[in-house]
Image (spheres, rainbow, N blue to C red):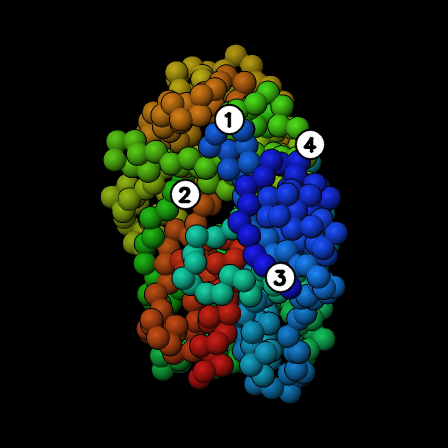
Amino acid sequence: MQKEYQLRVLPHIAAKSDELHSFISKEKNIPRDEIRHVEILRRSIDARQKQVVINLKVRVYTGEGYVEELISLPDYPNVSNAKEVLIVGAGPAGMFAALQLIEDGLKPVILERGKDVKNRIADLKGINVKHIVNEDSNYCFGEGGAGTYSDGKLYTRSKKRGNIQRILELFVGFGAVRDILVDAHPHIGTNKLPPIIAKMRECIISSGGEIHFNTRVTDLLIDGGSIKGVKTLENETLRADHVILATGHSARDIFELLHQKKVRIDLKPLAIGVRVEHAQSLIDSIQYSCDNRGPYLPPSPYRIVKQVGGRGVYSFCMCPGGVIAPCATKPGEIVTNGWSSSRRARATANSGIVVELRPEDFKKYERFGPLAAMEYQKAIEQKAWEAGGKTQTAPAQRLVDFVDRRLSANLPNTSYAPGITSVELSAVLPTVIHEALRNGFKEFDKSMRGYLTNEAVVHAPETRTSSPVSIPRDYITLQHPEVKGLYPCGEGAGYSGGIVSAAMDGIKCAKAVAGK
């Protein structure tokens, strides 16, 4: 027999199987020796009170044996000789689109400007250690997309955009831990995600699909209002009647190409700010209301949103026990982001803290039309590069000094490997962003007492929160309204924000292609 229960337990009980069994036996009046297995269906942390508790949804098996339900992959057919569909980009949108196309009997041909996950590592080392930016292989470009080496967070609020459980189960089928099926904020980790992505690639290829690395698309072949294929940097022409455009939020050359070819794109406001690093122990003490979180609680995240002068100022991509990474995609710019390993074991916590921007904020760049927000982004990144000494050294400031407009006399070491240099960040950030952040940090401290400390360090800038453009598509067919057969997809087109929502959009576009 099996029965489901909602439980609230102390952290050590949730962490230890024997103690959880004993708790359920006593709480639900079930003889201890009759409990065969306790399956955790859902797990979340409630830190609103001084005593932190774990909320569990469990299924208790009694009086019978328990056989773990295996998560298996679909029975993918061989599509070697099927109709080809081109996919531009091997991020989560592109990879999951490819898997769905195979399920539907079509052959995906993925064109990825960057390298495979293994060979990307040398280029990440290049930017971290030697300050060398490879325009095609970096934290943003390459197999798996930006999420592969920037954390692997799987939480999304896009509950209505697709089947989240299916995405998570596919990840488990390719090797992710089953915990992602039960945690309220699932996370794989930068160290665990690359081999999972590699298994996806192997599945696509063994099923007859193709993946071409180091293949940058430089032109779209359009004739009579229909897509006919693409051209690559090597001047190779690939023909297809269906192209899924899943390039990610940093493919500025693709946005420029579309604008140049007079294919409609629209300006999309985004959020820009900084990345702030605290000691993880401080964040734990604030969030868990204790001096030491102990061995049974994970490093604490935080999420905070404030309205400052009518604008949203909020945390973005918070990384407990994490590292700040250099995420430029071109020489002459600085971009920061963050990641955590699966254990989130680093001593520091970092988060993007960003400011909501509006169309009128880009007025200075209106001559660029729909690319105005992109040019606004670029200008900030280039200023940061100049302020950092024209290397990947990031301009930085202690947090209280930032709020008080005071140049920091010195800076502590941070997790940002290329290094930091003391700069008054009003010289890098536009006034609207700088002032909103200064006042926002004061508001943050009212909700998280101790957050506003001069031991925390502000790194600039955090600019790649989302795409600076949206690429329109028909609500029903998902094709571009002016180019039949072109399917704008994922984060770069403005239809997702993160791994899971991008994967769902990839599946959605693939199904639309199969329907045609």
The numbered mark, 2 or 1, whose residue comes first in the sequence reads: 1
The reply to whether residue 299 is visible in this rendering is yes
Residue beneath disc 1? 50
Labels 3 and 4 touching (C-beta < 8 A) = no
Residue beneath disc 3? 2
Residue 476, located in which quarter of the rendered image?
bottom left
The numbered mark, 3 or 1, whose residue comes first in the sequence reads: 3
Q: CA distance from mark 3 to mark 2?
A: 55 Å
The reply to whether residue 112 is visible in this rendering is no
Labels 2 and 1 touching (C-beta < 8 A) = no
Q: Looking at the figure, which quarter contains the N terminus?
A: bottom right
Residue beneath disc 2? 377
Taking the spot 72% from the left edge, 55% from the top edge, the residue there is 34
Left or right of 79, for residue 278: left
Residue beneath disc 4? 295
Mark 3 belongs to which amino acid? Gln
Q: Please state which of the two labelled residues, at mark 2 or mark 4, is closer to the viewer.
A: 4
Horizontal and vertical percent for residue 375? 38, 46
Taking the spot 60% from the left edge, 44% from the top edge, the residue there is 27
